[in-house]
Amino acid sequence: MDQQNKRKKKLSEDDYVNGVLEGNRTILAQTITLIESNSLAHMNSAQNVLTRLLPHTGRSIRIGITGVPGAGKSSLIESFGMYLCEQGHKVAVLTIDPSSTITKGSILGDKTRMDSLSRNPNAFIRPSASGGSLGGIARKTRESMLVCEAAGYDVILIETVGVGQSEVQVRSMVDYFLLVMLTGAGDELQGIKKGIMELADSIVINKADGENKIKALAAKAEFNRILHLLQPSTPGWTSKAYTVSALLSEGIEEIWTEILAFRQITLDSGYFQKRRQNQMIDWMYNMVYDQLKHSFMNHEGVKLNLRSIENSIVNGTITATLAAKNLLNIFEGTERGNLNAGD
Amino acid sequence: MDQQNKRKKKLSEDDYVNGVLEGNRTILAQTITLIESNSLAHMNSAQNVLTRLLPHTGRSIRIGITGVPGAGKSSLIESFGMYLCEQGHKVAVLTIDPSSTITKGSILGDKTRMDSLSRNPNAFIRPSASGGSLGGIARKTRESMLVCEAAGYDVILIETVGVGQSEVQVRSMVDYFLLVMLTGAGDELQGIKKGIMELADSIVINKADGENKIKALAAKAEFNRILHLLQPSTPGWTSKAYTVSALLSEGIEEIWTEILAFRQITLDSGYFQKRRQNQMIDWMYNMVYDQLKHSFMNHEGVKLNLRSIENSIVNGTITATLAAKNLLNIFEGTERGNLNAGD
């Protein structure tokens, strides 16, 4: 009753902050909606709320989970999340789905895909923000993660599909990165993006049950060979492969044991904290650089001349260096018009 | 005599253009020196000369060669270059050495490392430009490559050390990228950068002679297994590993056979031309974005506040989003001073 009343009236910044800190799930969800809003007033409010929540963030382990479609990420998160809740943890599941930028709607089935977990009072599941650039979606997910931490969630799972650029974004916001694969390494690998294995702190071969079990063990050996040849994703940590069955809930505990060992080692070496600090600062610079690019590409004079300058480069009538210089002059307003090169 | 006189007087832009087009090696070298100059007047002259040379560029195959120090790149280039000269080709060897930014001097031994090749009238060897950023060195190498093409060199070899960012730069300026490795894949691989194998159109296992031969063949099999698992660097081309001995000049012909096959396949598919066009345009954008970053990082107000804003992010008193916004406001001059977040 009380919550229904609250939902009807406009929340103040105090309401958001206090609600989140009390662990109120309704207000947690509303705060994330505020963060996802593209209205200027909402964005300002969201930053005010976030700034006040900042001192209460960071006390979690942030885990990224990626894999090609069909690798069984959802069923794995369902099993893993249920296990963590049984252990007394509070688990937040966030999704970065770049396709939601195109369809303007996110994976609608997120909650139904994780049926038991979505009904668990210690779990909070939120599908991907939709609309805007991948960078924009990633910002919203990072900030949603902070809000979940302030609300007391101590395990954050960020799921993404390992076919685009989103897994690089996820790697840059988590402590631990887990790649979910299927058996039959040789074929499946073709589907994953270049360099993605080198981002992983572990490779989990899913669906290691029934007739698949022998193939899964072979794939595990194969992946371990490859991981041995690659530089580790995290200094001081040896990435390795192991098998799980989300169906039979086998190997789930091992995932958590590995992550706890990882956390201990990186906390002891100081890399855990160092990575988080670097992630925050890098993120800030990336937002700055993205905005600079955006300003450049949306400058009227630049837009007007871009196509013809690209054509001149391709046709060999202007050097790339002069073309860049001309465009920068247009952008900086020091020279408009005359774009002929070489004189 | 004539050339000595020319060297003494200041060359006009006509002298540069005509000298290069005549294939005059002295003037070719002087033109590259002009391109490498950081003086504004020289940079303007260089762009004028380059623009006039542009219609005469592009008629070559551009080959990048990388590998860890000690992999035998120089001896391989010596053997390969001599073979090409014997086949009637004109070969230009350029180097990108990022360490030359630090030492302010390039690999002095470049010519002595390639003793026979440097004395061959159909070969032209030029060490890395020194000083400036890697981006600056890369620009100079790209433009030197164009000048060499205008001077009639039909095979361009660009050598770099595969331990930093330079091999990504080289990949972005060549048609074909060759990774030189040694036997004993497992150990050697540790030294090379993440993702570098995925840039390669072929892996050449060098020093496959004497007692090394058996190990080299084992390494070849191992690399072929890994390459099979990775996405190809060039669509339509299957990257593969093979063994050579620069010492015994064995396998050298096979390198060239492979490259000719690669050129034919990519010309037929249109990817050869498409990649070159994309490379030119991407390069232009990279120069623009680098310059935007440079302007930002060198802005007085930004420089003044950067450190304290970074600290505020790390200490959790400001969100990264607000920090980025504040810095952009400073840069754009719309707001100076007041940097307190959240109010």
Image (spheres, coloured by chain):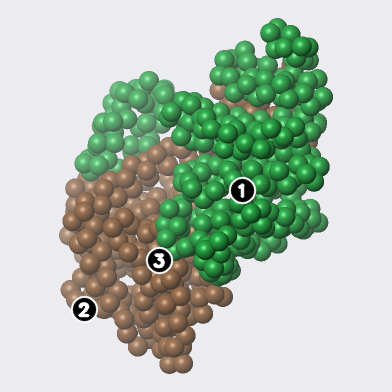
Chain colours: A green, B brown
Disc number at residue B86?
Answer: 2
Looking at the figure, which quarter contains the C terminus of chain B?
top right
For label 1, count other residues whose C-alpha is less than 10 Å away and answer few (under 14), some (14-19) or many (20+). Answer: many
**Residue to which mark 1 is pinned:** A76
Give the mark nearer the N terminus: 3 vs 2: 2
- Answer yes or no: is residue A189 visible: yes
Q: Chain of mark 3?
A: B
Which callout, 3 or 1, points to the residue nearer the camera? 1
Instruction: Estimate the x, y position of residue B138 in percent, counting from the top left.
Output: 42, 53
Determine the CA span between mark 1 and mark 2.
Answer: 61 Å
Residue at (27% x, 67% y) in the render: B259
Tell me the quarter of the picture where residue A245 sits.
bottom right
In-image side of B17 versus B251 (left or right): left
Instruction: Estimate the x, y position of residue A227 in percent, counting from the top left.
Output: 57, 65
Residue at (28% x, 58% y) in the render: B236
Residue at (20% x, 56% y) in the render: B267
- Check chain identity for marks 3 and 1: say if they share one: no
Disc number at residue B228?
Answer: 3
**Where B92 falls versus B320 (above or below)?**
below
